[in-house]
Amino acid sequence: MNKKGKWKIYRRGFCKGFGKAVVLGILFYRNAVITIVLGCIYGIYSMFAEKKLFRKKQETEITLQFREGLQGVAAALTAGYSIENAWEEAQKDLVLLYGPDALLVQEFQWIRKQLLLNQPMEKVLFAFAERWQTEDILHFAQIFQTAKRTGGNLIAITRTTSQKISEKIEVRREIDTMIAGKKMEGRIMNAIPLGMILYFWICSPGFLDCMYISSGRIVMTVLLIVYIAAYQWSERISDIHV
């Protein structure tokens, strides 16, 4: 990723975090200075959280594409191509499926260039796997290295790996479908405390004024910490790894 792309992610993360913190600052403190300070602090935190989320989405995307790529490699090997040329043929299929700018298309292009420089296939695959640090790609690189050294069936290995990745993706989708309703319930429950504060502001003006003086702000700070902890807990519960 180039610097322009990184700054775009950081800018988006800061704006999202700043906006959320401003809403919380207004509701819990009703003070411009505190609100801006909270917005800046959470905005900086959200910059790195956004980068991590973007990386996670990329890893999911490249895993999906890697499944298709392995199927293309296996088909090319079955047609009689060498292992080096099979990756080039698989790249052509990926361009048709995902376009020339897809993540795995760019990686396959890099792999092809390294092979043209007479780099060992095992070494190139390990470099690719270490750059992404995804479980499926790392496992394939390890199995491929062993099979290449011992004369294993590369066609069967690539097909089996592609099948296992497909099964893992399907399990992930089933889990996401099952917990989608619970995630929505969690988001609604997270919004209820904020809605209650806003309700008192509108329907009972002055009722919460005692909470926005020096002693009341201590109580509101404790409540804000509890609210953030509950929000993070609900997010972690629904974040199931396969």
Image: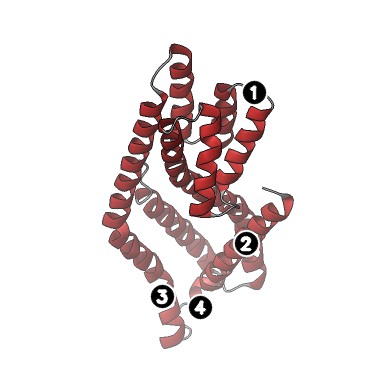
Q: Residue at x 31, y 41 (%)?
A: 167
Classify 127 as above or below 177.
Answer: above
Q: CA distance from mark 2 to mark 1?
A: 39 Å
Q: Amino acid at mark 2?
A: Arg
In primary-sequence order, the first of circles 3 and 2 is 2
Classify 141 as above or below 41.
Answer: above
Residue holding disc 4: 209
Q: CA distance from mark 4 to mark 2?
A: 34 Å
What label does residue 12 carry, if any? 2
| Badge count | 4
Q: Amino acid at mark 4?
A: Asp
Judged by depth in the image, the label closer to the viewer, 2 or 1, is 1
Of the 4 image quadrants, the one containing the C terminus is top left
Q: Amino acid at mark 1?
A: Gln
Classify 202 as above or below 62.
Answer: below
Q: Quadrant of residue 187?
A: bottom left
